[in-house]
Amino acid sequence: MRKNFIYIFLFLGLPIVFLASNPSITEYFIRGIDAIFSQLVSLFFHAIFFSIGDVPLVVLWLIGGAIFFTLRTNFVSIRAFRHAIDIVRGKYDSPEEEGEVSHFQALATALSATVGLGNIAGVAIAITLGGPGAVFWMTAAGLLGMSSKFVECTLAQKYRTIKPDGTVAGGPMYYLDRGLAELGKAQLGKVLAAAFSLFAIAAALGSASMFQANQSYSAIASVMPQLPGWLYGAVVALLVALVILGGIQRIGRVAGTLVPAMCGIYVLAALWVLLLNFQEIPQAATTIVTDAFSLDAAGGGFVGALVQGLRRSAFSNEAGVGSAAIAHSAAKTKEPIREGLVALLEPFIDTVIICNLTALVILTTGVHESTDSSAIGGAQLTAAAFGAAIDWFPNVLAVAVLVFAFSTMISWGYYGERSWSYLFGDRSLVVYRVLFVFGVFVGAVVNASSVLKLSDGMLYAMSFPNLIGAYFLSNSVVRDLDSYMLRLQAKKLAIRKADLLT
């Protein structure tokens, strides 16, 4: 680790100092990157987000997969929900089982990669563009996405590799490779695994490092306008480097502390706002349901609400993308189904709880009607909603954006690292780490729109190879699930002493 940090400091420190002291050169450098990629990005972005009836193809692909897995697993998200909570509480934990993190830490790591700007800004955007009815379809899609998370994370556990030093290598690239080979589709598996890994690396270097740094700096600059971007980028880049060099165990510990704390603060603030406006909650809930099926185009209409709800759900919880499977593959367990059940809680927490709380805060305070929402961003609209009841909370919200962005960076840093390792081996990981940390700095300094668009497209391109493999391997997941549930009902699963949040 110390050697890697020295490499990162040597190869990263001097360029950062040079670029920080020459902002005009930095901007010229980024504009050059933007110009080179602009045409390629335009073609790729439009291909990934090609729309059918105003719904992007990738969204239909993700929602179609969620419906299929929900039916194929016989609504596992409902019948095993309570048991999933027991697992996270530590009821079935065993320190002797192979892995690097606990069930709770794996869940926190995966949540840290999804809970963030989508919950704060994405919900406001959905309401602005699709009307309050978008919240209904967002919630429905989130509930369906729980089954997608279950399948992909179960497979990640089932086909993971435990290295001699005890570290875990797992994720879609491994179950695409090894799982499809077992079905006699080895060549297809290798192609899909390589494609997934390349997409994941690109998404990590762009969406996770550059975009998160850029957006979090914007949030902090709103309350600290005197803070220069280069200083913010340099500090955050250093902190990210210190965490990701510690591997999944350190990431799990940090995420296990940051995510519950910030989610708790955010949820408590939302509940306080709703308590102050409790008389408006029934009307807000009624509006969400009625507008979901309304034909009134002025309020977004049925199609507008459906499209925005599905998009925001897919983009918020990433169910079907396969990213979370990388984190869950490292959990300590001998039961792949068990970790899949833990994973299905993610869309519920992310979309059903946090996104709905954000929506209710916006609707009950009425800022979406009293404010020109088309003239401000989603995060600003959400901040205005909280600020209407808690005048100092927009400052806290800015810090929340920073923490959520930081947790996303470290989690996605690990996702990209595991994908890099699959393609190029562990010996060249320092190259990836330098690129990732450098991307954090550059993202805080200037916005490279084409690079960010490309990485955003890569993020959702991951769902194509991931879901193809998951479809082929779903029969084995269902067989394992049936066996597990029979043992659970017969009380043949060993119950451990609960060791919460370890």
Image: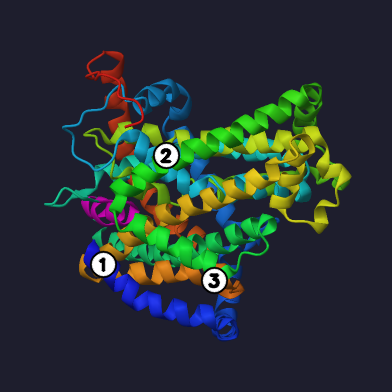
> For the view shown, which residue lies furthest in the top direction?
490
Question: Alpha-carbon neighbours of circle 1 within 10 Å: few (<14), some, or many (≥20)?
Answer: some
The quarter of the displayed image where residue 215 is located: bottom right
- For residue 146, side relative to residue 310 (left or right): left
Q: Which residues are magenta?
A: 169-182
Residue 73 placement (x, y as % from top left): 41, 32
Q: CA distance from mark 1 to mark 2?
A: 25 Å
Q: At 56% across and 64% down in the image, what residue appears?
A: 48
Q: Amino acid at mark 1?
A: Asn
Identified by mark 3, the residue type is Trp
Q: Count neighbours of disc 3 (C-alpha within 10 A) and say few if under 14, some if 14 to 19, many if 20 or more.
A: many
Nearer-the-camera pick, 301 or 203: 203
- Identify residue for label 3: 230
Left or right position of 250 against 457: left
Report if residue 461 is visible in the image.
no
**Looking at the image, do the residues carrying marks 1 and 3 touch, with CB atoms under 8 Å apart?**
no
SS at badge 3: helix
80 is higher (above) or lower (below) than 255 = above
| Residue type indicated by callout 2 | Thr
The residue labelled by disc 2 is 257
Q: Residue at x 53, y 39 (%)?
A: 262
Examine the structure image and report whether residue 170 is included in the region drawn in magenta. yes
Residue 343 pos. (x, y %): 41, 37
Pointer 2 or 3: first along the chain: 3
Residue at figure coordinates x 53%, y 44% from the top left:
115
Which residue is denoted by mark 1 in the rendering? Answer: 4
Residue 237 position in % (x across, y down): 44, 64
Please tell me whether mark 2 sits on a helix, a strand or a loop.
Answer: helix
Mark 2 or mark 3: which is in front? Answer: 3
